[in-house]
Structures are given as C-alpha cells and as structure tokens.
Image (cartoon, rainbow, N blue to C red):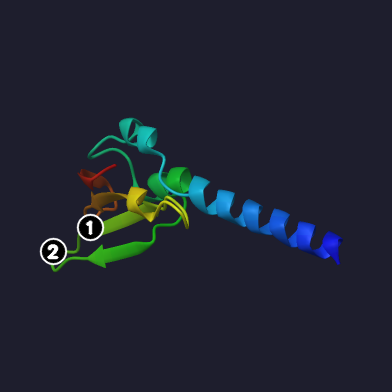
Amino acid sequence: MPKILTSAAIAALLALSACASSGVDPGAVHHFKPGVTTRAQVIKRLGPPVSIYVGLDETKTLTWAKTGGLFNSASTQGLSIQFGPDDKMVKVVSQP
C-alpha cells in the first residue's frame, strides 16, 4: 500500500509542476515584428492559444495564458496578440 501512495504523490507533484511551467514565454514577444511575423510563426513559437477572438474587421486576437498552478493562481499571466486579415501581426494587445 505505501508504494501506491508514494507513486500517487509523485504523479501529483509532476502534474502540478507541469501546470506551473506551461504557457507563455514573455521573452518571445521581442522576436515578433508587426507587419512581418505571421500568425503561424507565433503559434509555432508559443503553441496553440487558449482563445481566439475574431473582430468585425476580420482581425484575430489570439490569447495565451500561463497559470501559476494550483497553489499560486494569482500569478496567472496572459499574452494577447492581434493579427490582421492577412494573418500578419498588428500589435501586442497585452503581455505579462
């Protein structure tokens, strides 16, 4: 029985550390250039966004989030980048 509890505890710690380390790379924003960087390039660098907002003007605002984890939810950070109808970056809307 103790082996099962130890294995469960290790699995839980690994899951929590994965939650805390996944998400936004704040330094990546410096590599993106408005009018040059494409949506595909940003997604390749940051991974899939957690949300996509499509505006009436056909712009797309993609948002990525990094959670502080179960015990530090106050440190959740988000990054939002707007892309034009041509899928090129327009601007960083918000960043950590």
Q: Is residue 36 above or below residue 6?
A: above
Mark earlier in primary sequence (1, 2): 2
Residue for point 37% across, 53% down: 65
Q: Quadrant of residue 31?
A: top left
Q: Which mark is residue 85?
A: 1
Q: Nearer the viewer, residue 33 or 85?
A: 33
Q: Which residue is mark 2?
A: 57
Mark 1 crowdedness (10 Å alpha carbons): few <14, some 14-19, many ≥20 = few
Q: Nearer the viewer, residue 96 or 13?
A: 13
Q: Quadrant of residue 38?
A: top left
- The residues bearing labels 1 and 2 have C-alpha atoms spaced at a distance of 8 Å
Q: Are marks 1 and 2 in contact (CB under 8 Å)?
A: yes
- Tell me residue 93's x, y (percent): 20, 48
The secondary structure type at the circle numbered 2 is loop
The amino acid type, in three-letter code, at marker 2 is: Asp
Q: Is residue 9 left or right of residue 69?
A: right
Residue for point 22% across, 46% down: 94
The amino acid type, in three-letter code, at marker 1 is: Pro
The secondary structure type at the circle numbered 1 is loop
Residue for point 47% across, 51% down: 47
Q: Is residue 85 above or below residue 56?
A: above
- Tell me residue 60's x, y (percent): 25, 59
Residue for point 77% across, 63% down: 5
Q: Nearer the viewer, residue 39 or 12?
A: 12
- Tell me residue 92's x, y (percent): 22, 44
Quarter of the image with the N terminus is bottom right
Q: Is residue 6 left or right of residue 12?
A: right
Q: Nearer the viewer, residue 1 or 72?
A: 1
Quarter of the image with the C terminus is top left
